[in-house]
Amino acid sequence: MIILYNLFFPLIFLFFIPGIIYKYIKRGGVKHTYPERFAIFSESKKKELSSISGRRIWIHAVSVGETQLAIDFIQAMRKSDPKYRFIISTTTTTGQELAQNKLKEVATIIFCPIDYFILVKKTFDLVKPELLIIFETEIWPSMIYEAHKRKIKIAQVNSRISDHSFKGYKRFSSFISPFLSLVDVSCAQTEADLQRLKIICPSLNVVKTGTMKFDQKVPDKLADIKLDEIFGEGSFLYLLAASTHPGEEKFIIGIYRNLLASFKNLRLIIVPRHAERGNEIVDELNAAGISYFRRSNKSSGRGSEVSCLLADTTGEMLAFMKVSDIVIMGKCFAGNDGGHNVIEPALLGKAIVTGKELSNFRFVMKIMLESKALIGVSDSELEGALRKLLENPQERKKLGEVAMATVSQHIGATQRTIVQIEKIINT
């Protein structure tokens, strides 16, 4: 299987090159070390890697979401055993930036090599880990095979299989199963994830540990966003559209215009999931006649009084959640599905409105709905739900308090995961 995979990889990779180039150009983040994706490391990075003493653990987290979880996980593992030394890799430039900002003092930070055997071998020669930890359920055949060949322990943590991924993985299970079988332990978020992993690879050692997302913590120091510098002095209500995807901005802007007729002090903040989409969102704001301030280049449009802040930047989501009154979580309206992490605004005690069913966060959504910790609505119900919350400050406050309390009742997945990892690393 590994021979076939690497034989066809260069041909398949050709189809991904345009997307890789586009994301590299359009997205922000750290880019000067991007050649590491091709196993090209600077002399200073090689020296840094060779000087690591102690029990080396390589943690791979693809993008910003996984990297944030990895940050908290590394801090917990450091407390478990101070001899652990960490190398963290990311695939995206934005994930790399987050790791550089948060982990520079406690980990060596690299880009993950493209999953081709020559590049993977070169990177393993430099990293020399005792343990490889892969966040969530990314299947990297060359990386997994190379670790196994070198007798390096392999763990998947916070594993989950979305509806969409399950269909694909199940269809190609004859290819995927041989690689998954090399993983020493997979720590699944839910019983459903455990069962799906077992269907894909019956021999896989899977343990349900819960979702680490409940263990997230608000950073001690969040950036202080001065909204009065953008919107001016006044008693405003702030509506945050968080992690939005194509189609959602136009939909939410339309609802905002309707609400503005009744709530003159309402202001909209849009934080798109991908900051490089700023230009198309500006077009939607202009088409709707909404005055705005664009944070990435400090430009404004349509008059001096700003109604909307377009935060097309990276790494500021929590700071904007902190100053908002209501948070709409994206990727679940206007034809989008799957959803995004509702735990982040819950940690800040915010009133949360999202779609009715989040296929990527089904377990979290189930718990939050059962506790009445958020509001799940369809497209046609969103405006009415927002209107009720805007009219009732006590309801907003109560919703936020219940959300925060619900999260606190489901912590512990990180420690359960560490127990499983220490079982394999010490055998």
Image (cartoon, helix red, strand yellow):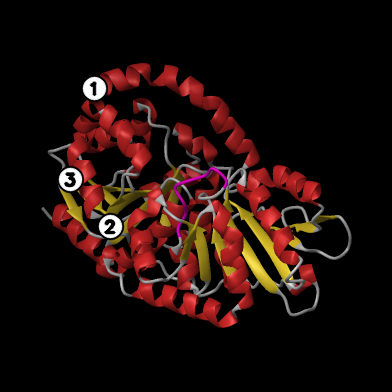
The residue pinned by badge 1 equals: 1
Whether residue 315 is visible here, answered yes or no, is no
The residue pinned by badge 3 equals: 184
Disc 3 versus disc 1: distance between alpha carbons? 19 Å
Q: Residue at x 73, y 57 (%)?
A: 295
Disc 2 versus disc 1: distance between alpha carbons? 34 Å
> For mark 1, does the 10 Å Cα neighbourhood hold few (<14), some (14 to 19), or many (20 or more) residues?
few
Report x, y in % for residue 38.
Answer: 47, 31
Label 1 element class: loop
Q: Mark 2 vs mark 1: which is more N-terminal?
A: 1
Above or below, 132 relative to 377: above
Label 2 element class: loop
Please tell me whether the stretch drawn in magenta is mainly helix, strand or loop.
loop
Q: Residue at x 47, y 48 (%)?
A: 63
Foreground pick, 57 / 354: 354
In this picture, residue 39 sits left or right of residue 195 = right
Foreground pick, 261 / 9: 261
Q: Going by the picture, which residue comes out furthest to the bottom?
A: 394
Report x, y in % for residue 7.
Answer: 34, 16
Label 3 element class: loop
